[in-house]
Image (spheres, grey):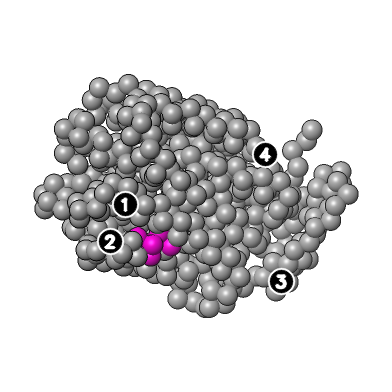
């Protein structure tokens, strides 16, 4: 059966199955990472190591997940997202199983940090890219629904992990998590390939190295194409990547240290776990609300992202002010909502900057570069805790990272404009360094037996999809207003 080809993302259909797959994958990857603070206390006591050393476990895992993302993107470009995600599920499970037999922190660094981290990279990046390829008009909503798995899992996993640790110790709990991670194989099997007209246009673009660098070795040209390294000359992409790197340095700090911070205030481990669970619940709500509001297109996505990141940073700054349990709970709820709201916007804005046809390469390079923030953020927080004796400085520095990233967003092209630039709502066609081709460029005719998209251009355009006896239509608005 031939792979269906569309002149623009179908905005639905099997795309909702892809969203469901991302929902489960985000739960089993980042839901697990967010709830790993339960093990943090156990590792400190069992290995008798300082908090900074134990923090490297999740930091290495997150950093490897992000640093290996270009590899996941290149493998997906070569062999498809489905097989790559399924291999990643095996590695994520294997790392947890090996970690259950750890005799030192180094063993945990290698098993959970390196092996599971590599598996998470092969799972997460191709899955997010597939969702953005299936949606345009409802992209932020679809991404937000997919990322709701993180909130649902965080709400359920924190007390579940505490229960598993209490009844089976941390070794038995990790072994169970290894079995749970095998469900990622099923998620990968749901990823049906999709071919867009823009894919062919970008491949044959005159500025593409594979067609213009005849003097380059074929292997070098092939690698350049698979990793889409031309994005490293794309100034809007590099600016956006710098902002996300700063976000990443502080984003995970509350999920790593908030449990220990609350326990240090004199509250029980189950009270701390309850705060994390309710924080995850507001995170879940924030993702859904953010996706719905963003797709209304009343406010431009860069402005929405700056709002949520700024509020997330401010909420981190005030966490140390909480001394009573109700105040700590309220601050956790605010942080959860704002941090959840920013996540779908981060990923839905990226295709608007580089074009949906380059999303695999862009996502891979973005996460590789932002891994610097993930690698340094949590250990820096743990080091500050060891130095000062509490987590006050840790939360202050984390909030400062978020606010600094918000300021970097102001450097995006036309950030202060009320109407989006052309490449904010890209039409199908090659997009190189943020430039869209002239309107005279027409996509090649599609096979009439395949699902097709008929486009009528103008200030808004109606997209009608036909195939398999079904018709679907949607209207896309070109300009976004403040």
Question: Which residue lies at the image location 46% right of the left edge and 46% below the top edge?
Answer: 156
Percent x, y of residue 428? 67, 56
Q: Is residue 334 magenta?
A: yes
At label 1, counting other C-alpha atoms closer than 10 Å, the crowd grade (few under 14, some 14-19, many 20 or more) is some
At label 4, counting other C-alpha atoms closer than 10 Å, the crowd grade (few under 14, some 14-19, many 20 or more) is some
Q: Quarter-wise, where is residue 330 in the image?
A: bottom left
What is the span of residues highlighted in magenta in the rendered image?
Answer: 332-337
Q: Answer yes or no: do the residues labelled 2 and 1 have beta carbons within 8 Å?
A: yes
Is residue 246 rendered to the left or right of residue 78? left
Q: What residue is disc 2 on?
A: 325
Q: What residue is disc 3 on?
A: 460
Which mark, residue 271? 1
Res. 78 in view: no
Q: Nearer the viewer, residue 345 or 327?
A: 327
Closer to viewer: mark 2 or mark 4: 2
Percent x, y of residue 266? 20, 53
Percent x, y of residue 445? 81, 50
- The tag earlier along the polypeptide, 1 or 4, is 4
């Amino acid at each position: 059966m031939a792979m269906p080809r569309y002149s623009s993302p179908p905005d639905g259909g099997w795309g909702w199955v892809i969203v469901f797959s991302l929902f489960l994958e985000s739960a089993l990857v980042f839901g697990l990472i967010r709830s790993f603070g339960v093990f943090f206390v156990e590792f400190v006591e069992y290995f008798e190591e300082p908090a900074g050393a134990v923090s490297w476990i999740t930091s290495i895992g997150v950093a490897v997940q992000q640093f290996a993302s270009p590899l996941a993107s290149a493998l997906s470009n070569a062999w498809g997202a489905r097989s790559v995600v399924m291999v990643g599920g095996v590695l994520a499970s294997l790392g947890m199983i090996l970690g259950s037999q750890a005799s030192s922190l180094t063993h945990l660094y290698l098993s959970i940090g390196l092996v599971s981290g590599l598996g998470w990279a092969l799972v997460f990046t191709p899955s997010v890219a597939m969702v953005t390829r299936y949606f345009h008009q409802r992209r932020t909503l679809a991404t937000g629904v997919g990322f709701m798995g993180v909130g649902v899992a965080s709400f359920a996993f924190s007390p579940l992990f505490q229960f598993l640790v209490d009844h089976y110790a941390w070794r038995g709990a990790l072994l169970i998590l290894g079995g749970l991670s095998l469900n990622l194989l099923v998620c990968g099997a749901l990823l049906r390939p999709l071919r867009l007209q823009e894919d062919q246009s970008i491949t044959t673009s005159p500025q593409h190295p594979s067609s213009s660098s005849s003097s380059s070795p074929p292997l070098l040209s092939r690698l350049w194409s698979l990793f889409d390294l031309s994005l490293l000359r794309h100034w809007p992409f590099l600016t956006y990547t710098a902002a996300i790197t700063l976000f990443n340095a502080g984003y995970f700090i509350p999920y790593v240290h908030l449990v220990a911070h609350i326990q240090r205030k004199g509250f029980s481990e189950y009270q701390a776990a309850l705060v994390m669970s309710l924080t995850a619940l507001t995170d879940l709500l924030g993702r859904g609300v953010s996706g719905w509001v963003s797709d209304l297109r009343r406010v431009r996505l860069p402005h929405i992202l700056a709002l949520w990141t700024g509020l997330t940073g401010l909420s981190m700054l005030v966490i140390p002010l909480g001394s009573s349990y109700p105040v700590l709970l309220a601050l956790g709820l605010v942080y959860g909502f704002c941090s959840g709201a920013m996540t779908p916007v981060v990923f839905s804005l990226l295709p608007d900057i580089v074009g949906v046809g380059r999303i695999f390469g862009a996502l891979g390079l973005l996460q590789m570069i932002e891994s610097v923030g993930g690698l340094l953020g949590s250990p820096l927080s743990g080091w500050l805790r060891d130095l000062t004796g509490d987590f006050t400085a840790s939360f202050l520095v984390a909030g400062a990272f978020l606010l600094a990233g918000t300021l970097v967003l102001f450097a995006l092209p036309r950030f202060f404009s009320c109407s989006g630039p052309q490449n904010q709502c890209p039409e199908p066609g090659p997009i190189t360094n943020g430039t869209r081709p002239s309107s005279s460029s027409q996509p090649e005719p599609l096979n009439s037996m395949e699902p097709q998209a008929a486009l009528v251009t103008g200030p808004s355009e109606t997209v009608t999809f036909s195939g398999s006896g079904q018709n679907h239509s949607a209207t896309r608005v070109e300009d976004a207003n403040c």
